[in-house]
């Protein structure tokens, strides 16, 4: 998949620059046309000549070192690239890109390129966990940049943890499989629910849950990337979509989510309910803020409607997928929900296991279809999990497991 592709490799300054040499060599062996831009700090670690010899192309460092008078190098490179890969990506280059700073050859070219950009970070474990770096990576992810997560292990700075540049073979594998994406959901309508619901008590208080909407938003993004026409019904969350084609419907309560899902359900091909819907809401909503009083306050709660169950009862050809958030016996409870709610598949999520569940950027799930066939998805980013779930759904729809 990288054969004959024009790949712009951005090398920023860290000890992992030596791995970028192997990366260049492997890409060239696979038939890619590789041009390298190094930052000045990267050139402190490895000589540009090494990259020139491996890529068989001149190496760029200085924006003003124009090699051809008839061209402006950074624009020419930006336009030439079909894929841009930053490996290793330091906290500095990530920060520059996330904030639109273009003060050297690499950052300037990256702002100018329309190519799909992959970023393989490598840095000290504490730098990788710094809120500024996390914020910058999130911003870039929201803009559609793809991250190739660093591995965990011994770091050159002496620490053991996450921050080691992913191995060149794995970086290439990620890019290849990503480039192989086919728009297999093209022409399909997909309805997704995400996030928590809020059930009001009085004008200043409400009941909610820990859902952040990350899984549902990742599903919406992935479905849109696979060519689907996506409608996303979401409770109150901080997440944002990057794909311009996704239609967003904001709701607050379980009742509003019920109405929105039913309004759009009829002409959908696939419906995925990843939202964490409140099962109960206060029976009485106070019109004014409740003042505190002596003694306890008892709030009577009433059941909300089970949206997924109600969709299962009326479905007519839609491939209906639920989520099950469990803390004990996940498979047993999850499978029961699959049958009881008349679903075509369920994504079971043991929210108590490490790396899974609410808030985080990763998940571990088991996808179970109507024939009780199980597909385990090991710890991965929510985006990767979303891609896998959609692939399973597509497979089962083609096999008519419905
Ligand atoms: N769900 C729904 N409406 C509700 C409650 C849940 O549509 N009022 C959906 C969720 O979106 C999810 C699935 O049902 O896709 C399972 O939700 P979960 O909270 O795991 O289970 P519950 O059905 O609420 O059952 P329990 O509380 O017994 O675990």
Image: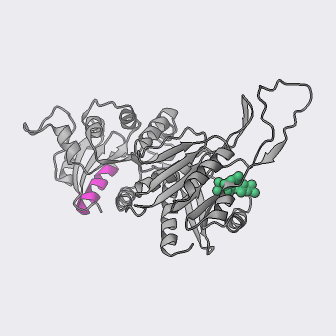
Q: Which residue is drawn at the image coordinates 51% and 43% (left, top)?
A: 159
> Can you say which quadrant of the picture contains the C terminus?
bottom right
Residue 354 lies, in percent from the top left, at 63, 53
Of helix, strand and loop, which mostly describes the magenta segment? helix
> Can you say which quadrant of the picture contains the N terminus?
bottom left
Rendered view: 191 above or below 157: below
Q: Is residue 23 visible?
A: yes
Residue 343 lies, in percent from the top left, at 63, 66
Q: Is residue 123 visible?
A: no
Q: Is residue 91 left or right of residue 67?
A: right
| Residue 71, quarter of the rendered image | top left
Rendered view: 132 above or below 81: above
Residue 340 lies, in percent from the top left, at 71, 66
Rendered view: 236 above or below 52: above
| Residue 144, quarter of the rendered image | top left
Q: Which residue is drawn at the image coordinates 68% and 49% (left, top)?
A: 277
Residue 48 lies, in percent from the top left, at 22, 43
Q: Is residue 331 on the magenta stretch?
A: no
Query: Of 108 and 201, which appears nearest the observer?
Result: 201
Provide the residue span drawn in magenta. 19-32
Query: Of 159 and 38, which appears nearest the observer?
Result: 38
Quadrant assignment for ligand 1: bottom right
Q: Is residue 228 left or right of residue 54?
A: right
Q: Which residue is drawn at the image coordinates 28% and 44% (left, top)?
A: 114
Q: Is residue 360 left or right of residue 165?
A: right
Q: Is residue 26 on the magenta stretch?
A: yes
Q: Is residue 86 left or right of residue 272?
A: left
């Amino acid at each position: 998949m990288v054969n004959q592709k024009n790949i712009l490799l951005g090398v920023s300054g860290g000890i992992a620059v030596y791995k970028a040499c192997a990366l260049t060599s492997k890409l060239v062996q696979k038939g890619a046309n590789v041009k390298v831009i190094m930052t000045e700090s990267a050139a402190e670690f490895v000589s540009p000549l090494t990259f020139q010899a491996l890529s068989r192309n001149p190496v760029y460092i200085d924006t003003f070192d124009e090699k051809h008078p008839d061209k402006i190098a950074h624009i020419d490179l930006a336009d030439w690239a079909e894929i841009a890969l930053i490996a290793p990506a330091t906290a500095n280059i990530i920060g520059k890109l996330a904030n639109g700073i273009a003060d050297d050859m690499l950052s300037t070219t990256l702002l100018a390129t329309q190519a799909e950009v992959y970023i393989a970070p490598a840095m000290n474990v504490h730098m990788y966990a710094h809120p500024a770096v996390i914020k910058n990576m999130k911003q870039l992810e929201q803009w559609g940049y793809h991250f190739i997560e660093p591995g965990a292990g011994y770091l050159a700075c002496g620490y053991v943890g996450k921050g080691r540049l992913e191995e060149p073979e794995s970086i290439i594998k990620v890019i290849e499989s990503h480039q192989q994406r086919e728009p297999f959901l093209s022409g399909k309508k997909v309805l997704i629910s995400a996030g928590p619901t809020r059930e009001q008590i009085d004008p200043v208080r409400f009941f909610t849950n820990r859902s952040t909407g990350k899984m549902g938003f990742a599903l919406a993004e992935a479905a849109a990337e696979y060519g689907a026409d996506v409608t996303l019904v979401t409770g109150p969350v901080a997440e944002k979509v990057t794909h311009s084609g996704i239609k967003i419907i904001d709701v607050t309560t379980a009742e509003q989510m019920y109405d929105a899902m039913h309004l759009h359900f009829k002409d959908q091909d696939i419906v995925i309910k990843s939202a964490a819907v409140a099962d109960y809401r206060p029976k009485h909503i106070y019109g004014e803020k409740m003042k505190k009083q002596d003694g306890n306050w008892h709030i009577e709660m009433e059941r909300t409607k089970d949206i997924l169950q109600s969709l299962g009862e009326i479905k007519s050809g839609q491939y209906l997928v639920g989520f099950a958030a469990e803390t004990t016996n996940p498979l047993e409870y999850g499978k029961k929900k699959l049958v009881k709610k008349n679903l075509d598949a369920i994504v079971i999520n043991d929210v108590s296991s490490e790396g899974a569940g609410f808030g985080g950027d990763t998940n571990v799930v088991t996808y179970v279809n109507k024939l009780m066939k199980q597909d385990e998805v090991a710890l991965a980013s929510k985006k990767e999990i979303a891609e896998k779930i959609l692939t399973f759904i597509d497979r089962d729809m083609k096999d008519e497991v419905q």
